[in-house]
Image (tube, rainbow, N blue to C red):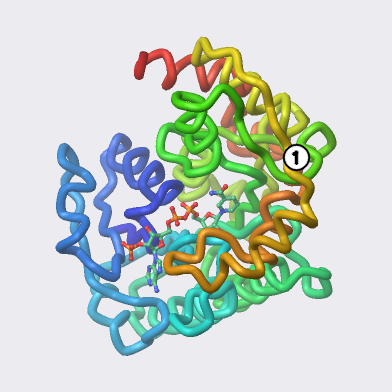
Amino acid sequence: MILVAGGTGFVGGAIVSELCKRGKKVAVLTRDPGRHKERFPNLNVALLKGDVRDPATLAGAMPGVEAVIGCQQFPNSPMEDRARRYTFEDIDAKGTENLVRAATLAGSVKRYVYLSGAGASPDADRHWFRMKWRAETAVRDSGFAFTIFRPSWVYGPEDRALNRFLRISRFLPFVPLIGNPGEQRLQPVFVEDVARAVAEALEKKAADGQTFEIGGPEVLTMSQVVRTALDVAGRKRALLPAPREVVKAAASLLRFVPGRPLTPDGVDFITMDALADGRQVEKKLGVRMTPLKEALAGYLGQRA
Ligand SMILES: NC(=O)c1ccc[n+]([C@@H]2O[C@H](COP(=O)([O-])OP(=O)(O)OC[C@H]3O[C@@H](n4cnc5c(N)ncnc54)[C@H](OP(=O)(O)O)[C@@H]3O)[C@@H](O)[C@H]2O)c1
């Protein structure tokens, strides 16, 4: 059995679907199986209760598990909430350390695939990259066969970023953006390509012990990405960027609002470049990186 931690989420959900399509036996680790019982209506997926912040809850999800896929992320990421332990340290770093420990104790686990992030490094300026590195280190030192993926900016039918812009464009004549969207560089990667790469990593020897960046085939600015999505959706809208420092000042107040719509660190996170070279995944795992317009035409076309 393959256990997907975070399998109810955006990337994890796509991985679960891809694995089921390939006939694998899949279980999902979730904090609340009841809330997600309609998540996979047409798939035979076991929902197992566990919280990566609480090691005692993880043992019960491990019996019979041969491979773990780690793609848990705290709610409302990247807006951290220390009081609730919704932080990169609690969920990415410690959460992965706890999962690796529980998998080791289980005795049946042979393989671990971890969804890190492009930019993970031990001495990065930003703590989210250092926490991703700490999680990677736990996986590399685990003794399991492992593969680590570092995605850039993932989009797809259930994403929260690009879909938010498209939603806003339904009722506003403009799309608000932050910072310098004409200069912010992204290599957007289609979620189904990430899911295929993860599924291939479970099957291909070439993935053993590898750390792969995974990004789409084009380097685009944020403005180009949003314009492409608007074009495919058949809408003409102006892009209206707000200065980053002004939004950060607003975020220093908004972080106290229930639901924490924005935090200053969150503003830095969402205005970063997100570049990752997907060519090694194409070469070694045989997964083609889909161009943005082609992927959007697929799912936005279906929606229309
Ligand atoms: N999305 C991107 O653009 C992107 C880019 C680079 C890297 N990544 C990486 O890809 C992974 C998945 O990201 P995503 O965007 O799919 O995240 P997501 O949609 O927010 O899903 C994350 C899942 O993690 C689970 N989770 C949250 N707290 C948990 C806890 N304490 N214990 C166990 N599970 C917990 C949640 O499941 P329940 O609510 O069911 O518990 C949630 O469905 C992350 O590691 C992220 O860093 C994503």
Q: Quadrant of the N terminus?
A: bottom left
Q: Is residue 220 visible?
A: yes
Q: Position of residue 267 (x, y in %)?
A: 68, 57
Q: Which residue is mark 1?
A: 277
Residue at the image position 54 percent from the left and 64 percent from the top: 145
Q: Nearer the viewer, residue 168 or 72?
A: 168
Q: Please, is residue 218 above or below residue 1 in the view?
A: above
Residue type of the residue flagged with mark 1: Asp
Tell which quarter ligand 1 is in: bottom left
For this rendering, which residue is in front, 267 or 128? 267
Residue farthest bottom in this picture: 56
Local crowd at mark 1 within 10 Å, few (<14), some, or many (≥20)?
many
Q: Quadrant of residue 188?
A: top right
Residue 22 location (% of width, % of height): 32, 37
Quarter the C terminus occupies:
top left
Instruction: Tell me what residue is drawn at x 15 percent, y 63 percent.
Output: 34
The image shows residue 248, relative to residue 298, as above or below, that is below
Relative side of 290 to 267, left or right: left
State whether residue 195 is above or below residue 3.
above
